Image: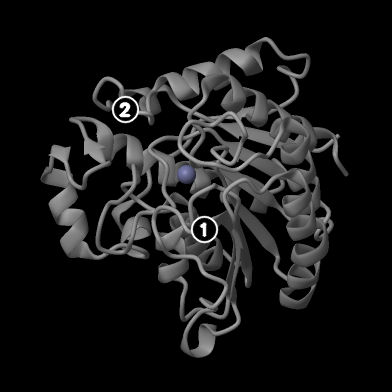
């Protein structure tokens, strides 16, 4: 069994979204309830996130944006709502990935799941977008680099393309970005021809999936394509944008990935390289039952898949 951290704090429930908004606090309540009722509830190491420092956030975001968002409340784009405590929650969401990186580098844990909100992968360097305020995975990746990891491989299986993460690392040959997502779909980016820029060219790999794609297509991406890319890049840490809106029951998109498909994706990821840290951070997933079921499958694999 692996030492797996579960990074969570109730601060994430204080990011309030208007009634009927799909990205609600109930998502984390459902996940925590499911975990409490599971057979392996005593297995993870329960860890509180730290609050990301301004320096950590500014390693990814512009100071102009950070100054603006700290003062803002209301809708800052058609989807992204900022309530009184949202920025505080977002600082802890980014800090959760930092805490996970830290706990992995000291050997306290080997793998982690960050149960956070707001999510992060749509947030660009200079703006909030698509329910996301700060780019949690990107902040974690920059922190990992600072704390001695040389090469970071980011995997993003949310149904939506992680435009923010891709753009932040477009020109970086030390951070690889791999994404599977429905395409064409929100946010519009993520075609196979987007491969990075400058010295970061060929360090981005998009696998667009057509509406209706399912387990077989994902099996091909995660068992046939991913391992070769990981092997070639040879990372010393893997960060995963874990969005469960690719599930067949999710209301926001049109892929047909089942529970078994989710399990195979997680196994494909974990078997791509042995003995390096794997840190999953929650992105989307809006059907509460499918979301909590998928997170349990992920935790089970993190714990028991060698
Ligand atoms: Zn999504």
Reading the image, the residue beneath label 2 is 21
Q: Secondary structure at mark 2?
A: loop
Residue at 11% in and 44% down: 71
Q: Nearer the viewer, mark 2 or mark 1?
A: 1
Residue at x 26%, y 41% (from the top left corner): 80
* Residue under pointer 1: 183
Q: Is mark 1 within 8 Å of ligand 1?
A: no
Where residue 236 sits, quadrant-wise, is bottom right
The structure residue drawn at horizontal position 24% and vertical position 30%, both measured from the top left corner, is 85
Which quadrant: the C terminus? top right
Apparent side of residue 304 relative to residue 236 in the rendered image (left or right): right
* Figure quadrant of the N terminus: top right
Q: Position of residue 293 (x, y in %)?
A: 66, 24
In x, y percent, where is residue 38? 72, 14
Q: Residue furthest bottom?
A: 198
Specify whether 105 is left or right of 83.
right
* First-in-chain label (2 vs 1): 2
């Amino acid at each position: 069994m692996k030492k797996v951290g579960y990074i969570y704090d109730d601060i994430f429930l204080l990011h309030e979204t208007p009634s009927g908004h799909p990205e609600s606090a109930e998502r984390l309540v459902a996940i925590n309830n499911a975990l409490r009722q599971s057979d392996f509830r005593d297995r993870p190491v329960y860890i509180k996130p730290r609050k990301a420092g301004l320096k950590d956030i500014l390693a990814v975001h512009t100071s102009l944006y950070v100054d603006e968002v700290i003062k803002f409340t209301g809708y800052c784009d058609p989807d992204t709502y900022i309530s009184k405590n949202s920025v505080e929650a977002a600082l802890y969401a980014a800090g959760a990935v930092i805490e996970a990186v830290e706990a992995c580098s000291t050997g306290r844990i080997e793998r982690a799941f960050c149960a956070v909100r707001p999510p992060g992968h749509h947030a660009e360097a200079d703006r909030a977008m698509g329910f996301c305020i700060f780019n949690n995975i990107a902040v974690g990746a920059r922190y990992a680099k600072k704390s001695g990891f040389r090469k970071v491989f980011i995997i993003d299986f949310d149904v939506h393309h992680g435009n923010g993460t891709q753009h932040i690392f477009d020109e970086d040959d030390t951070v690889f970005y791999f994404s599977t997502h429905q395409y064409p779909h929100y946010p519009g980016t993520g075609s196979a021809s987007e491969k990075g820029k400058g010295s970061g060219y060929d360090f981005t790999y998009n696998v667009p999936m057509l509406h209706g794609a399912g387990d077989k297509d994902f099996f091909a991406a995660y068992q046939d394509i991913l391992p070769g890319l990981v092997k070639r890049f040879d990372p010393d840490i893997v960060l995963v944008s874990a969005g469960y809106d690719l599930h067949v029951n999710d209301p926001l998109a049109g892929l047909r990935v089942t529970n078994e498909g989710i399990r195979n994706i997680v196994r494909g990821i974990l078997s791509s390289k042995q003995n390096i840290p794997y840190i999953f951070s929650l992105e989307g997933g809006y059907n509460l039952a499918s979301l909590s079921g998928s997170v349990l499958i992920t935790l089970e694999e993190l714990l028991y898949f060698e």
